[in-house]
Amino acid sequence: QRANGKKGPPKEMVTPKQAVALKKEGYKLIGTHSAVKLCRWTKHQLRGRGGCYKHTHYGITSYQCMEATPSLACANKCVFCWRHHKNPVGREWRWKTDDPYMIVDEAVKEHIHMIKETKGIPGVRMDRWEQAHTVRHCALSLVGEPIMYPRIDELLGELHNRKISTFLVTNGQHPDAIENLRPITQLYVSVDAPTPESLEAIDRPLFRDAWERLRRSLRCLKDKGQRTVARLTVVKGWNSDEVEGYAKLVALGHCSLVEVKGVTFCGKSDASNLNMSNTPWHHEVVALTVRLRDELNRMHEAGGDDPPPRYELACEHKHSVSVLLARVDQFSVEDPVTGERKWRTWIDYEKFQELAVKAAADPTFTFGVEDYTAETPSWALFGASEEGFDPTDTRHRKKKKHPKYTKFDKDGVPTHDHAGNVICEEERSGLRQLMEEKMKEVGSGESVMALKGGEIKVSDASLMFRGLTITK
């Protein structure tokens, strides 16, 4: 008898139609409910063209990272999901359950097979290609809800046995599973909206008590002991305001880190009504993160029964439109010579594996965030000239396109040209006049218009010069 009370053996999760759709998008299916896919950042770093934001924020090696999931099913149908809902949905596990050791073994084999296929890609560095055959990190964030898988704890243990670090992302709808989870390298809860109403609109959850489930999940983070992350995906016009609501949610978990990332527009589909105007620019995400930092620190200063810790901006990865807030008490140390703050948001992966082995052997053994931090390099820090791009790699632009303007004033008027040279006052005056004319047309500031089918269009004259490019 199945878990849902129906008779007969449980069905397989993925239907033949769903399998065809997922394979068409590059997913390699494993067993009856798992998958892997080669991340574009893996290919980028293999070619020496830069790593992902996790490389910048936490020091992972992007070309040694496997992106996978043990559950293609999810309890949400988020408007920004880049999988366009070709995967199954459900509130509880009602399918056949595959062996976790088989899933890990087949996932690693399939990942390495995909790595082998990259050998012929122009620009692949052979030293990195050879190292990429050893998987060192696993991002359990590919598609679906990984924590739904009933044997997730065993799967995480097997990854640790293979000395593979674990980054698990959950949508916060399964608080009991979060509470019972073994120590992992880094545990994420997606915080996609600041109010119950906006959560309903943007995540489109199957659970009627989705808001309380999210709050319970965040409260569970406070007692985990290891690195925890509140992950905010910013969708302009949908969830980019009400910073106070976000701060209250982050405060519930005293999260170690807060990732604030702009949504990636993945094209139109029947499953999503987003458009390019819903994608924020990096400076907009920075501004939101600053406001969130200020609100959290205001709550800290106000005190009360359970005030949040202090946070500061630690890292940024402009290419991913991503900014990292970090707890000062866990990741900041004072240089004994200069007195300046040094950030330690990177991870000592060898140390984590050592601690994870001890915790698995002795349930009474505990360890904390500070036990496996490592110093963040200067190029990864917020405000650095590299903007989160690793200087050991080479920045690549498609078709040799470069931004027409590189710096702007507070109103969005360009101040520097494509080469970084200061624009003369006469040209700036002309550009400002063009912006003023645009403001007469669409209004000053950000305006939001609801369109047919639930689509939201965002207009802002201050952004009119930011997307312009030149070919050189």
Image: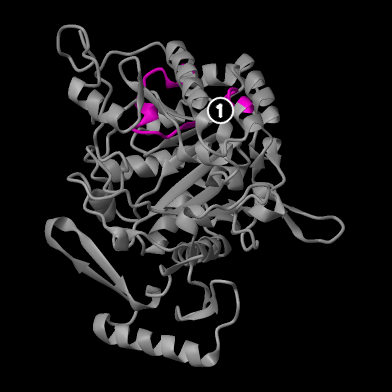
Is residue 276 positioned above or below 61 on the image?
A: below
Q: Quadrant of residue 277?
A: bottom left
In the picture provided, is 83 more to the left or to the right than 283? left
Is residue 191 positioned above or below 426 on the image?
A: above
Specify whether residue 223 is painted magenta. Answer: no
Q: Amino acid at mark 1?
A: Pro
* In the foreground, 446 or 417: 417
Q: Are there few (<14), some (14-19), or many (20+) residues within 10 Å of tag 1? A: many
Rendering coords of residue 146 (x, y %)? 39, 28
Q: Quadrant of residue 47?
A: top right
* Figure label count: 1
Q: Quadrant of the N terminus?
A: top left
Rendering coords of residue 402 (x, y %)? 50, 64
Res 223 seen here: no
Residue under circle 1? 183
Residue at 57 percent of width and 30 percent of height? 64
Rendering coords of residue 4 (x, y %)? 20, 18
Rendering coords of residue 42 (x, y %)? 52, 36
Res 175 seen here: yes
Range of residues picked out in magenta: 130-154
Is residue 58 positioned above or below 239 on the image?
A: above
Q: Quadrant of residue 190?
A: top left
Residue at 64 percent of width and 49 percent of height? 390
Q: Residue furthest right?
A: 337
Is residue 294 positioned above or below 273 on the image?
A: below
Specify whether residue 142 is painted magenta. Answer: yes
The colour style of the image is one colour
* In the foreground, 281 or 101: 281
In the picture provided, is 75 more to the left or to the right than 344? left
In the picture provided, is 399 more to the left or to the right than 382? left
Helix, strand, or loop for circle 1? loop
